[in-house]
Structures are given as C-alpha cells and as structure tokens.
Amino acid sequence: MPQKILVIDDEKLIRWTLEQHLVKEGYEVATAESAERGMDLIADDAPDLILLDNRLPDMSGLEMLEKVKVRDRGLMVIMITAYGMVEAAVKAMKLGAYDYVSKPFNLEEITFVIKKALEAGSLRTQVKQLRQECKAKVGTLIGECVEMEKVKDLILKIARSDATTVLIQGDSGTGKELVAKAIHAASARVDKPFHAMNCAAVPETLLESELMGHEKGAFTDAKSAKKGLFELADSGTLFLDEIGDMDLSMQAKLLRILEEKTFKRVGGVKDIKVDVRVISASNQDLLKSMSDGTFRKDLFYRLQVVPVMLPPLRERGSDILLLANYFIDHFNRECHKSVSGISKEAEDVLLSYSWPGNVRELKNVIERAMILEVQDELLVEHLPQELLEEKETSASGIPVSLDGFVIPDQGISIEDVEHALVRKALEIAAGNQTKAASLLKMPRDAFRRRMKRFGII
C-alpha cells in the first residue's frame, strides 16, 4: 500500500507540480489550498507525511502546527518556507516539524527529504509499538500494590538498557524467574534464546561444563563436544538462579566472562565471544555472604548494576486475592472445574496468613483445593489446616501486658501511642523495618508510611 502525502500550499502550480512528481515516485497524494481544508483532510485520514507551506491565506503554517498539535499526534511534517526565513523554520521544528525546505526548491532535494522523513516516521511507529508491547508483556505480572508497580516500572527501564546486568533478590517463591522472563520479553532480545539454570541444583563439578560447555575428551564422560549455556544463550538472556550457592572458584570465572565477554570451553584453547545479558537471582542475603567471605564483592557489584527487590507475599495486601483468583482461573482450565470465586471467610484466612512460601505456596494451596474439591466457590474448609491454625492463633491474639502503662491525666492521642509503638518495634528489631512491621502485624509499606508520618525517616 503506497504511503500517503498531503501537500498544503495556496499556489496551484506548486500543488500540481508536487502531486505529479510524487505520484510518479509511487506515493498517494492529496492536496489542499488552505490550512482549514488541510485540517479537514488530516481529520478524515491522517497522512504519513505533510508538506506544509508557511504562508497560507487563512493562517500561517506555524499557527496550523500549533492547532493540529503535530508533536502530540506524531505527524511527520516538512515545512516549506520562503528563502532566508531561517527563524520561521527553526520555530516550526520546535513545534514538531521534522525538517524544512526553502523556496525555490528542486524536486530531487524535496524527494530526498521526504524519504528521510518517512523512514524516521516508520522508526517512530516501530518504537511506539515496541513500547506498547513491552508494557503489555510486563502487565502479565499479577499485582497492583505499590511495590509491584515499582517493580514493573523498573522492568521496563531495564529492558530498554540492553547491556545491563540485573540482580533480582527476594524470598524463595516470590517469582524471581518470572521477573527475569518479563525483562527478556520486554527487551530487544525477545526473539533470541532465554535459558535458565538453578546454580544450587547443579553439582559444583558439573557447573563449569553446564555454563561454558566442554570439548571432546575434556574429562572421562566427555565423549563429544558440548555447548554450554553461554553459547546457547548468545544474543539472548541467561538467568542464573540461586547465584549465592556458586562456589568461589566458579564465581571468579563468571566474573571474567561478564567483564571480557569471552570464555573457553572446559578442555578448550579457543576463546569464544558471546553477547549475553546475565540476570541473576538469590534468596540469600548476599551482603552477609560477602562479609562471611562466601561471595565475591567484585562479582556482587558487577551483577548488581540494577538491583530488583521483590516483596514477600505477606507484604502485598490485596494482591494475595488477585493472585488467588488468577490461579483459580488457571486451574479451572487445567482441572476442568468451574469455581467462580472465594468466600469472604476464605478471603480473610488467605489475607491473614503469613505465606512463608510466598506466591509458590499460594499456587500450591489453590491447586490442591481445586483438585480435591468440586464446589462452585472456594470455602474455608477447602484450605489446608496450617492456614486455619495460623488464623486461629492470630484471632486469639498474644497476651499483651499493659502493666506500667499510664494514661496521663491530660489524656493521650492514639496517634502518639502509635508513634511510640513504631519506635519500640524498631528498637526491638534493631532497626530492621521488615521485622518491626511483622511485630506490629502490618505490611512493610504501611509501616514505612507511618515512619515517614512520624518523621522517623
């Protein structure tokens, strides 16, 4: 389908000349003798490019640029100005015009500028579509809490910076591999390989061979040459889960690969060059591992160019119910069931449970209930006993001694009591905000909001 060009000029000869020439060049051409007529044509069917004269009978081309809001709409415009009108041309480009040509112009010149503008417009469209696709892919991560929205925004920023290494940290079961896949899917590497390996699941003696491959005869069982994950993931993404379980010797080799982008297979002598984005993850406290001497500082800082911290499920509030309903829909399809929702009592149990196994545990709970039960609604009795026991313990409460607590004669506000409790919880938790929030049975983000309100941070 030919690209459409709109010529807006009050001189009939110029309109006719441009139309005849551009049709021969393979374009579809429409013309207008005034700004008003041009705006009508743009409203009916926006062209791929507009040739706009600055001097029109009803308004100037600059005024039309402002009125049509070409920058906001992404319209490609080439201004036609009188010779020497540089100031008008510069102002037009500030208002969103792509380029300008001065009268008198030759047809070869204007054809060249048009081709450049159309190529730039096509590139803009592709970038816009890519960004929309990226947002759609990241949108598949279930969660609406503040912390998860921050994670989604961070994923989009990381995806645009193709060379960045990423370290994802969070408790086991929080969805670190899902985030790694979302980064890959939202990046320019989406059509290239994604490979994942759990470092804790591979014996130390085999880890180097799994990552770098080996040559035939490199060791007893090496009966043929084998590519490692770095080669298989070339131009794509390699996700290394549980990076904290990697031994120091292998950590040194990994650091060299990251810095030099080359390696040798086990038993090989040839340097192999690769372009791989490495995303690593750990549920360990790597800062503590560094102080213990079990994780290299230089590797940590090389991996953590951009850190992503995933919140535990217990801190995600109503996301628990969003995820539960998502898993119900999933297992409705897999198990051929028709569970329509969750009872209010079951919702209360799900929201009050601490979820030590995080999202993975929630998925298992829903799957077990869906396999064993056939009712239309997920009820309390369908939930595992450990969830019910924790709910009962929470409901019964822990005895709190108020001995020694005195309400002053002048009274005290609940706000002041809450302030004192926040400070006391932080004192008991030695400044650990997550632990302090847990002591007060509230999500960490809610606890931090109170800290800000009371001027503690």
Image: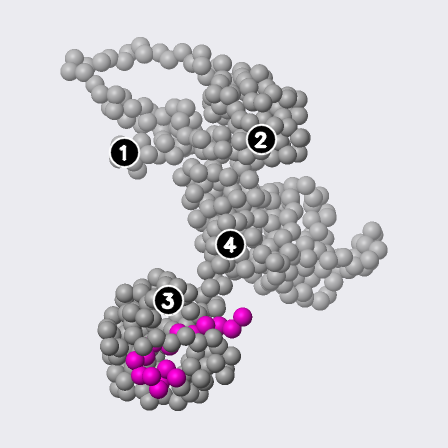
Q: Which mark is residue 133?
A: 4
Q: Secondary structure at mark 1?
A: helix
Q: Residue placed at 48% from the left, 68% from the top?
A: 122
Residue farthest to the left, as pictured: 410
At label 4, the amino acid type is Glu
Q: Which comes sooner in the sequence, label 3 or label 4?
A: 3
Q: Nearer the viewer, residue 257 or 322?
A: 322
Q: Say whether residue 228 is left or right of residue 405.
A: right
Q: Say whether residue 88 is left or right of residue 4.
A: left
At label 1, the amino acid type is Arg
Q: Which comes sooner in the sequence, label 1 or label 2?
A: 2
Quadrant, the N terminus: bottom right
Instruction: Find disc 1 in the rendering and name its residue.
Output: 453
Q: Residue placed at 39% from the left, 84% from the top?
A: 16
Q: Alpha carbon of mark 1 to alpha carbon of mark 2: how far?
A: 38 Å
Q: Which mark is residue 328?
A: 2
Q: Which comes sooner in the sequence, label 4 or label 2?
A: 4
Query: Which residues, given as a range, are shown in magenta?
Result: 1-16
**Above or below: residue 250 compared with residue 443:** below
